[in-house]
Image (spheres, grey):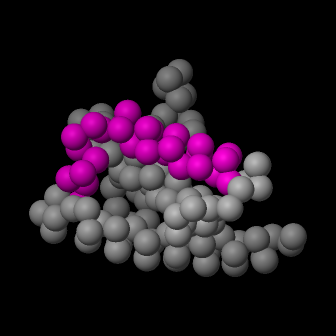
Amino acid sequence: MKRKEFLEQAEALFDVCFSIMQAKNEDYSSVDDALKNFRKRGIPGILTRMEDKISRVEELATKDKEAKVNESVLDTLLDLANYAVIAAIVWGENRSDSDDAEEVGGSQLQLPFDDDESGTAR
């Protein structure tokens, strides 16, 4: 696959991810606290949800199983991508007092850095 096609597909998938995130955020949170359902368990809770999605992909994709619920492998992978974004936002909120803020998409976002404090984003 050529770079142009890859980037076009990635952009299309990011758009789908964003639409899914908007819809699910309306279902699971409030206008005043978009991360309401993730604050209870924080990063460990988000990682657990990600592990569930990974397990689902492993079962369906590697064992060529038929899904019993209406969630395809692609749906599961897009959910996994959204959980990664949510984890990055929660991680950034937890580091709001640090000096590691970076400009991302026109807003300040706290990003995780390597433990060696080299300033290299993971």
Quick one: quadrant of the C terminus?
top right
Q: Is residue 101 visible?
A: no
- Which residues lie in the magenta part? 34-60
Vertical comparison of 89 with 16: above or below: above
The x and y percentages for residue 83 are 45, 52
Which residue: 68% across, 61% down? 66
In the drawing, does residue 7 fall left or right of residue 86? right
Q: Is residue 5 visible?
A: yes
Q: Of helix, strand and loop, which mostly describes the magenta segment?
A: helix
Which residue: 48% across, 34% down? 113
In the drawing, does residue 112 fall left or right of residue 77? left
Q: Hey, which quadrant is residue 77 in on the image?
A: bottom right
Q: Hey, which quadrant is residue 10 in on the image?
A: bottom right
Which residue: 86% across, 72% down? 2
Name the foreground residue: 6 vs 51. 51
Vertical comparison of 104 with 58: above or below: below
In the drawing, does residue 40 fall left or right of residue 113? left
Farthest residue in the left direction?
Answer: 32
- The answer to if 54 sits in the magenta stretch is yes
The x and y percentages for residue 87 are 40, 46
- The answer to if 76 sits in the magenta stretch is no
Quick one: quadrant of the N terminus?
bottom right
Which residue: 50% across, 44% down? 52
In the drawing, does residue 9 fall left or right of residue 104? right
The x and y percentages for residue 54 are 59, 45
Name the foreground residue: 24 vs 73. 73
